[in-house]
Image: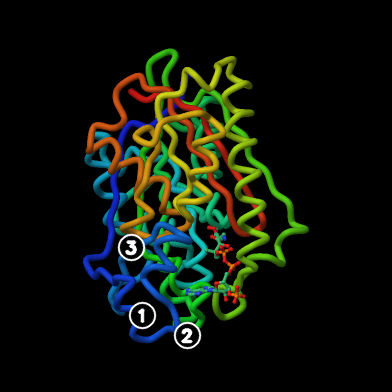
Amino acid sequence: MDVGVIGIGRYVPEKVVTNQELEKTLDTSDEWIRTRTGIRERRIAAADMNTSHMALLAAKQAIEDANIQPEEIDLILTATVTPDQSFPSISCMIQEKIGAKKAAAMDISAACSGFMYGMVTAKQFIENGVYKYILVIGAEKLSKITDWDDRSTAVLFGDGAGAVVMGQVSPGRGILSFELGADGSGGKHLYQEKYISMNGREVFKFAVRQMGESAVRVIEKAGFTKEEIDFLIPHQANIRIMEAARQRLDLPVEKMSNTVGKYGNTSAASIPISMVEDLEAGRIKEDDLIVMVGFGGGLTWGAILMRWGK
Ligand code: UT7
């Protein structure tokens, strides 16, 4: 059975915080942030908007887009490192709020790779015939675990949510291959105590190597060549990291998703938010061969090769 995306949705908070605004409170500059990261602005959720609210808004859109009823959903998976509380999970909160009466629910903690982990997990349950429809959400309120006095991290992150409904798709479409991985020995380079703490250079080196290598591996695993790839959705962490992955696949600039400039790094939400925006803008078309690739805290990584369409 071929398994893919049958509905999409996303939510980003209204409040825009520009680099110029950060210049007022931090020893930084718009020029430094733009040239080192590609980020121009990010969205920051209001105090009374938590991760579950953003997740809910994205999820409702995805369910409507899939043209199914919440009661038909079998499982809810939310990838997040910023749950409202450690339990109940965001997925359980969503289960109640949308009325997904028969759905099981759990959250996935794989940092910025979380959405890739969620999609791959969903694929297994659908493929083996146990479940029919699975809601996969990536949602983060990173602003609540950001130290706004630390210029080395505060300029990087933003808030938002993306969601997909996964189910059976026509033969040859959907997820064609995937790779998930972890290297706990690198956990010390990116972690949260109270706030996000990061060794930027180490994570940068890991990301450049891992994104390129896993993208190439999922393409080869499915028997394709990089020349056949139509579009790349890399985790939106830093334009320099994304560019390295794009060059590894020899793709032109217009064939790579680029939302990091306006949203910053939204961790588990970055790939689904990008997916929705690229579809809406017509950059992804029916039957396109797409590579999605993420990396993040853990350290973790995940890549998916997918033929777009239901
Ligand atoms: O989702 C996964 C999460 N993490 C990532 O993807 C992050 C991966 N790493 C990166 O994206 C980059 O390493 C950063 C953007 C974090 C940093 O860029 P870099 O080119 O690796 O800079 P650096 O850390 O080597 O710092 C260069 C200089 C330093 O000053 P000195 O030591 O050369 O005097 C920093 O103190 O830039 C300084 N610096 C800043 N200056 C202005 C660091 N942050 C800032 C800032 N504004 N915001």
| Residue 92 % position (x, y) | 43, 58
Q: Looking at the rendering, which quadrant does residue 302 occupy?
A: top right
Task: Pick the quarter of the image with the C terminus.
Answer: top left
Colouring convention used in this rendered image of the protein: rainbow
**Label 2, on which residue?**
149
Work out whether residue 192 or residue 201 is closer to the camera in this orientation and state it: 201
Question: Residue 18: which quarter of the image?
Answer: bottom left
Residue 51: numbered disc: none
Of labels 3 and 1, earlier in sequence is 1
Residue 163 appears at what percent x and percent y?
36, 47
What's under tag 3, amino acid-wise? Arg
Q: Type of residue at label 2? A: Asp
Q: Secondary structure at mark 2?
A: loop
For numbered disc 3, what is the local secondary structure? loop
- Left or right side of 230 for 16: left
Q: Residues within 10 Å of mark 3 (few under 14, many from 20)?
A: many
Q: Give the numbered dot on residue 23.
A: 1
Distance from the alpha carbon under mark 2 to that under mark 1: 11 Å
The 10 Å Cα crowd at callout 2, few under 14, some 14 to 19, many 20 or more, is few
Secondary element at tag 1: helix
Q: Amino acid at mark 1?
A: Glu
Q: Earlier in the sequence, mark 2 or mark 1?
A: 1
